[in-house]
Amino acid sequence: MKIAILSRNSKLYSTTRLVEAAQARGHEVRVLDVLRCYMNITSHNPSIHYRGEDLTGFDAVIPRIGASVTFYGTAVLRQFEMMNVMPLNESVAISRSRDKLRSMQLLARKGIGLPVTGFANNPDDIADLIDQVGGPPLVIKLLEGTQGIGVVLAETHNAAESVIQAFMGLKVNIMVQEFIKEAGGSDIRCFVVGDKVVAAMKRQAADGEFRSNLHRGGTATLVRLTPEERSVAVRAAKIMGLNVCGVDMLRSNHGPVIMEVNSSPGLKGIEFASGKDIAGLIIQFIEKRLESLETCKDKTRTRGKG
Ligand code: ADP
């Protein structure tokens, strides 16, 4: 197989591991900086160019598209799809997962447990919004935040109102969420490949912190999932239409609640915590999927809804 990896930096742990795993299984692999890919979309014969070269002959493409380049990155991925190159995750599914509200609406529609979440646009509606999610303490999140930045815990009504007003004044989109106190500053990352959770880790926030992101000083350990958690993670991935993803959940008093489904989950934390060759499992998944699609003319059928 000839595999393209769309990544801005070939030295990143996840990218390096995917290259190693593909080569170890005898595949040809190339890392492409997604922002250096350019294309002519009017052509009857869709093509992608890279630093003056015409890119051809790829069987599969692994998108590792950072949140800041979603728009351009998904356009490039779509062009690969038009050229009948099988994407590990489809462009449509990636765009869907990058819109946090849309994702939560889709998951809620299918009965997946979520923290009670609200959003509003007008400052006049703040007080009612706070009541709707059950009052303080509550969590206020920037929709465009990543790695825990822009996630604030407001412990009183006044604090919540001030923070929401400040964010609204800055014209950024936010959501307001019930605080799952019983999670005790930890969350669970389920790594899904195909229709299985291949590894899971519990991330525990540093002392005095409620955000468990590894980038915020959280620590990761292996965790045993309940059958319910396992099944919720696989269902969430299916609903989002993602073949490979990280499903983040909190253990609440009323069962697992999903916070986010990440379409480009990092490999470092999960490979270290689980000791598993996750990159290898991803390459094996691509091999199997390509084999099953061999007789199918369109390798990029859109899955998921909405
Ligand atoms: P990001 O996408 O920036 O990582 P998250 O929504 O995942 O933001 O939130 C960051 C961390 O904050 C989570 O990993 C979790 O530990 C904590 N957290 C987020 N939402 C809640 C909540 N509703 N209740 C309790 N803890 C939360």
Image (tube, rainbow, N blue to C red):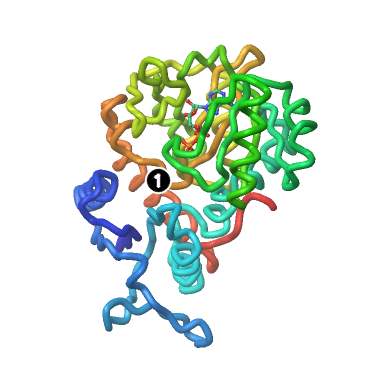
Mark 1, residues whose alpha carbon is within 10 Å: few (<14), some, or many (≥20)?
some
Q: Disc 1 on helix, strand or loop?
A: helix
Pinpoint residue 18: horizontal percent, then vertical percent. 28, 48
**128 relative to 211 in the view: left or right:** right
Q: Nearer the viewer, residue 291 or 265?
A: 265
**284 relative to 105 in the view: left or right:** left
164 over 114 or under it: above or below: below
Quadrant of the rendered structure where residue 189 is? top left
159 over 183 or under it: above or below: below
- Residue 239 seen: no
Q: Residue at x 32, y 37 (%)?
A: 278
118 over 28 or under it: above or below: above
Quadrant of the rendered structure where residue 131 is? top right
Q: Nearer the viewer, residue 19 or 94?
A: 94
Q: Which residue is mark 1?
A: 285
Q: Nearer the viewer, residue 103 or 24?
A: 103
Q: Residue at x 58, y 25 (%)?
A: 154
**At label 1, which amino acid type do we have?**
Phe
Which of the image's four quarters has the N terminus?
Answer: bottom left
Pinpoint residue 116: horizontal percent, then vertical percent. 69, 27
Quadrant of the rendered structure where residue 10 is? bottom left
Pinpoint residue 107: horizontal percent, then vertical percent. 67, 38
Count of marks placed on residues: 1
Q: Residue at x 49, y 58 (%)?
A: 293
Residue at mark 1: C-beta within 8 A of ligand 1: no
Pinpoint residue 153: horizontal percent, then vertical percent. 55, 26
Q: Residue at x 56, y 32 (%)?
A: 259
- Residue 64 seen: yes
